[in-house]
Amino acid sequence: MNNDIVVKVENVKKSFKIYYDRNKTLKDILSMPGRGREEKREVLKGISFNVKRGEAIALIGKNGCGKSTMLKLLTKIIYPDSGNIEVKGKVSSLIELGAGFHPDMSGRENIYLNASIFGLTKKEIDEKLDDIIAFSELESFIDNPVRTYSSGMYMRLAFSVAINVQAEVLLIDEILGVGDVSFQKKCFERLKEIKENGATIVIVSHSMGQIEQICDRCIWICDGVIKEEGKTKTVDAHYYQYMEAERLGRIEKDEAEERKVKKEKTEEMELPAFCSKHAKRKGGEDVFFDDIVLTNDVGEETVVYNSESNIHLKITVKSKLVDCNANFSVSICNREGQVYYGTNLVAERGDLLRLRGNNEFSVTFDKLNLLSGKYYVNVGLYNKQNDVLDEIKLAKSFLIHSDYDLKETGIIHVDHKWDMGKVDIISYE
């Protein structure tokens, strides 16, 4: 293995046997013959990646994709069915915090017990004891039995032990939410220190904001294989889009079923399939919107956009009339109908659409600069007298994932600059 490579994973596969209500007696076997069946589930289907010395990487993916299994393989808690894993140097794993703690022993005694599991000698633990206790902020309780600790105190002590082990490779699984907000921040700052000191870190987390701050690279695991690997911010954005699109797809399916049931019960006119659940329609008999599709710059249909993305609306209109001149309007609003932006052909260009049979056109919104949230598109067709031909409020929904989250409030991002003049600036820390 290359000296710069600390973790090497080559075509690793791992599967588990899943048992369904295993039969225990002869009576069970005879009365319920299918009850004891088992299923082989392949969790990892050929994973390969390398981690360089001093690099921090994140493993992301939805629950059950295999990322935590991969971390347990790196710690040698479990072993792969096939493939090869090599890890250089002393490993500290923050996977099962507090594993080995004895409830009747004091916090101080459990520090010695837990640290010995990480491979520290008594002398090494003696040298680190004061730092571990100080970091945990449990000085007043350190000689009390651990069974008297709250869950937060228990996790603080366990994290403090694990984080003070001077390891060359640190493996972390979903434990960055330890304790209160202040302690979480301190834990995160310690991780950044450990990284700056040259440790190699592999993190499994659902917290995109945290891993973007600490990780150099991100590996997205989907259904047991690597779907994407690259710069953390880029992969995170694609993962977020994928998850939101999947979630909204389930919602849209449920909404379509609701509309179908509603139509059967009330015999009302069904909204077009492209409409959101909250859409409200007026008109649409002789001239009507037949389809509205939202796409990104490469023509992919999606419902999740970055605040600086362009959104393309591809619109199809059908007209039963031989000749129809219509004004087209479009606007963007929130769920309550508050319009953030709107325009129409007559006001902006002095033009009308000449509609005959099937008609297609598009509108592009450049860099909306909206902050994160769910938004809707309103569309309308009107004749010269401004009578409604077809109007659909809340026709299509889309999500904005903003890079300005937690930094700004409101609806939109406004470009701005800070000029502090001669005022002294100090760190908030």
Image (spheres, helix red, strand yellow):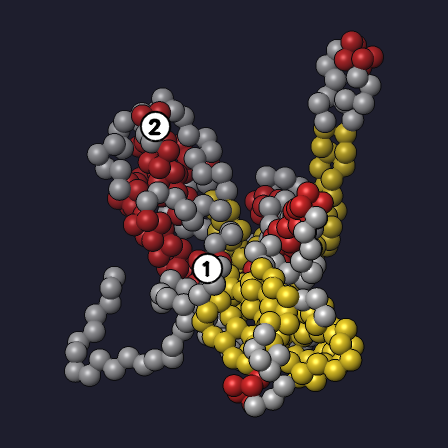
Residue displayed at 56% across by 90% down:
349
Quadrant assignment, res 421: bottom left
Residue 15 is situated, as x and y percent measured from the top left of the image, at 72, 41
Q: Nearer the viewer, residue 329 or 235?
A: 329
Q: Nearer the viewer, mark 2 or mark 1?
A: 1
Q: Nearer the viewer, residue 297 or 143?
A: 297
Please, what secondary structure does the residue beneath circle 1 have? loop
Say whether residue 103 is left or right of residue 361: left
Residue displayed at 60% across by 46% down:
63
* Label 1: how many Cα within 10 Å (few below 14, some 14–19, many 20+): few
**Disc on the earlier residue, 2 or 1:** 2
Q: Nearer the viewer, residue 115 or 37?
A: 37
| Residue furthest top as drawn | 27
Q: Which residue is mark 2?
A: 146
Residue 19 is situated, as x and y percent measured from the top left of the image, at 72, 28
Q: Nearer the viewer, residue 163 or 119?
A: 163
Say whether residue 47 is left or right of residue 189: right
Please, what secondary structure does the residue beneath circle 2 have? helix
The vertical placement of 139 against 214, above or below, is: above
The vertical placement of 31 against 275, above or below, is: above
What's the amino acid at mark 2?
Val
Say whether residue 80 is left or right of residue 423: right
Q: Which residue is mark 1?
A: 336
Residue displayed at 70% across by 59% down:
273
